[in-house]
């Protein structure tokens, strides 16, 4: 959904908000839809790319309905699972150490090498699932600030 949709949605929200209480409620719901968070995307990407062994990193973040989600695609330079786990752990430590990352943001679900033959996840580092920044900070002893 590009800028055309954003303009149409903005016009619809304006019209609905002028049409009384029911329209105002619908406008509020419509404006709570996908709200991209470029700060989240830029911070996660910059942090990831600063780690030795990270070939590329792309993140998409959205804040909606008072919550949101983060998705990341991270490619590692690794020829074995052990190498991939070492790079992934360095990246998780970098996330933990970056004070501008919000504690509620999630880390990537998986990490792949360049040809896709090696795929690791946070479970390889002792996490039961995909950790948040808060959980990574607690795990690596970086504190729970935020």
Image (tube, rainbow, N blue to C red):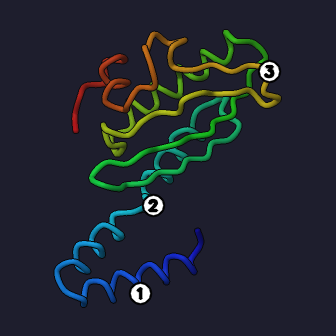
Residue at left offset 23%, top offset 28%: 144
- In terms of sequence position, does the residue under pointer 1 or pointer 3 come before the other? 1
Query: CB of mark 3 within 8 Å of CB of mark 2?
Result: no
Helix, strand or loop at mark 1? helix
Q: Quadrant of the N terminus?
A: bottom right
Query: Gap between marks 1 and 3, in whole Å?
Result: 47 Å
N-terminal label among 1 and 2: 1
Q: Where is residue 40 shown, x and y percent of the image?
A: 43, 51
Examine the image and state in which quarter residue 81 appears. top right
Q: Residues within 10 Å of mark 1 (few under 14, many from 20)?
A: few
Task: Give residue 117's mark.
Answer: 3
Left or right of 99 in this view: 125: right
Q: Which residue extends farthest right?
A: 115
Label 2 secondary element: loop
In what quadrant of the picture does the C terminus appear? Answer: top left
Whole-percent x, y for residue 71 in the image? 53, 42
Q: Residue furthest front?
A: 22
Question: Which of marks 2 and 3 precedes in the sequence?
Answer: 2
For label 1, the residue is 11
Residue 36's mark? 2
Indicate the position of residue 42 as horizontal and vertical percent values. Answer: 50, 53
Nearest the camera: 3 or 43?
A: 3
**92 sits left or right of 86 in the view:** left
In the foreground, 104 or 29: 29
Image position of 15 with respect to 63: above or below: below
Q: How far apart are the alpha carbons under marks 1 and 2?
A: 18 Å
Q: Is residue 11 above or below residue 124?
A: below
Q: CA distance from mark 3 to mark 2?
A: 31 Å
| Left or right: residue 134 compared with residue 46 | left
Q: Which of the 4 image quarters holds residue 121?
A: top right
Q: Secondary structure at mark 3?
A: loop
For residue 130, the mark is none
């Amino acid at each position: 959904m590009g800028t055309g949709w954003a303009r149409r949605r903005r016009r619809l929200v304006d019209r609905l908000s002028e049409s009384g209480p029911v329209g105002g409620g619908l406008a509020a719901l419509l404006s709570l839809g996908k709200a991209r968070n470029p700060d989240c995307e830029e911070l996660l990407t910059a942090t990831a790319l600063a780690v030795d062994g990270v070939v590329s990193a792309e993140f998409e973040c959205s804040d909606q309905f008072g919550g949101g989600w983060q998705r990341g695609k991270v490619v590692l330079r690794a020829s074995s699972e052990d190498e991939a786990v070492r790079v992934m752990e360095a990246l998780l430590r970098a996330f933990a150490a970056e004070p501008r990352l919000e504690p509620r943001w999630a880390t990537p679900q998986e990490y792949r090498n360049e040809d896709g033959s090696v795929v690791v996840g946070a479970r390889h580092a002792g996490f039961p699932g995909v950790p948040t920044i808060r959980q990574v900070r607690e795990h690596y002893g970086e504190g729970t600030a935020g």
